[in-house]
Amino acid sequence: MKNNLKPLLASIILLALLTGCAGGQQATKSPKGYDLHSPVKYNMTDALTEISGIAFNKGNADTLYAEQDEDGFLFYFKPGTDKINQLKFGKGGDYEDVAVSNGWVIMLRSDGILFTFPLKDLKKGETSSNKQIDLLAKGEYEGMYADDASRSVYVLCKHCSVEKASQTTTIFNLKLAVDGSLSNAGRSTIDIKKVEELTNQKKISFHPSALAKNPQTNEWYVLSSVNKLLVIADSSWSVKEVYTLNPAIFHQPEGMAFDKDNNLYISNEGDKFAPGNVLKFPFKR
């Protein structure tokens, strides 16, 4: 009997690790209403191998808007189809996220410079974007979310000059005017110490890559691609839950959005071995 105890204990320990870590981190669990292990996968064409940000207009799932890291194009298409439309809005650059709000498309470049242009220009097939600088602190940016009702645009730091102690992640709040211009409207922070507490790690590398708001709960969903984490915070940015993402499913998660039916979408950059993709996680009541 003694010889059988070791493998039995090992199995019990492994099961405990897989079903959830102490302190709030969920190793195999998912946020309420979602199963992060069973997505519907949409593979992207070569043009979107390096798909980064994604967004919907008013939550309409018929058209997904996207961009990639190198070229100044807005891509738009119906998820699940191979027909990818595109609109040139600017020069090539390291574009990291896209938002659509109140008739405007907002593009975020990694250096914190933003570009806006009218959504209606898609019908014309051409546009001229408005380059907006000096709105954000010096640093690197990847995540952005726009709220229609409040006309607010939230931009999330990946590495910022204002975060010298590396204990917080800063969110800049901008206001979108009717003419598509943006202005500063304050800032908030995410407490990285709370993320560390919930993951049982003393020092965690937390460099957010995407931001979205759950329309049903008003909770903030924040992706960190570097260490495959999904962080959920309340409407005041107080961290509530942390989930570890399976790297076999989430190769390089860079974009995130919800549709009006509360389905969750996460985009993954591809590489020379695998295409980029968009994963849909249907909402389950």
Image (spheres, helix red, strand yellow):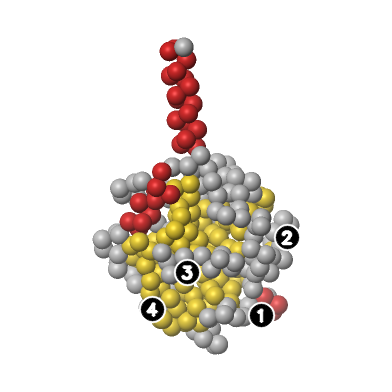
The kind of residue on which mark 2 rests is: Lys
Could you tell me residue 142's position as x and y percent?
45, 63
Could you tell me residue 202's position as x and y percent?
30, 48
- For label 1, the residue is 120
Q: Is residue 278 above or below residue 14?
A: below
Sequence-wise first label, 3 or 1: 1
Which numbered disc, 3 or 4, marks the residue closer to the eye?
Answer: 3
- For label 2, the residue is 83
Crowd band around label 3 with a 10 angstrom C-alpha radius: few (<14), some (14–19), many (20+) = few
- For label 3, the residue is 235
Q: Is residue 52 above or below residue 114?
A: above
Residue drawn at 30 percent across, 68 percent down: 162
What secondary structure is found at the residue carrying circle 2?
loop
Which numbered disc, 3 or 1, marks the residue closer to the eye?
Answer: 3
Sequence-wise first label, 3 or 2: 2
Sequence-wise first label, 2 or 1: 2
Sequence-wise first label, 4 or 1: 1
Q: Are marks 3 and 2 in contact (CB under 8 Å)?
A: no
Crowd band around label 1 with a 10 angstrom C-alpha radius: few (<14), some (14–19), many (20+) = few
Choose between 50 and 3: the one closer to the eye. Answer: 3
Could you say which disc has been placed on residue 186 in the image?
4
What secondary structure is found at the residue carrying circle 4?
strand
Sequence-wise first label, 2 or 4: 2
**Alpha carbons under labels 3 and 1: distance apart:** 31 Å
Residue drawn at 58 percent across, 63 percent down: 257
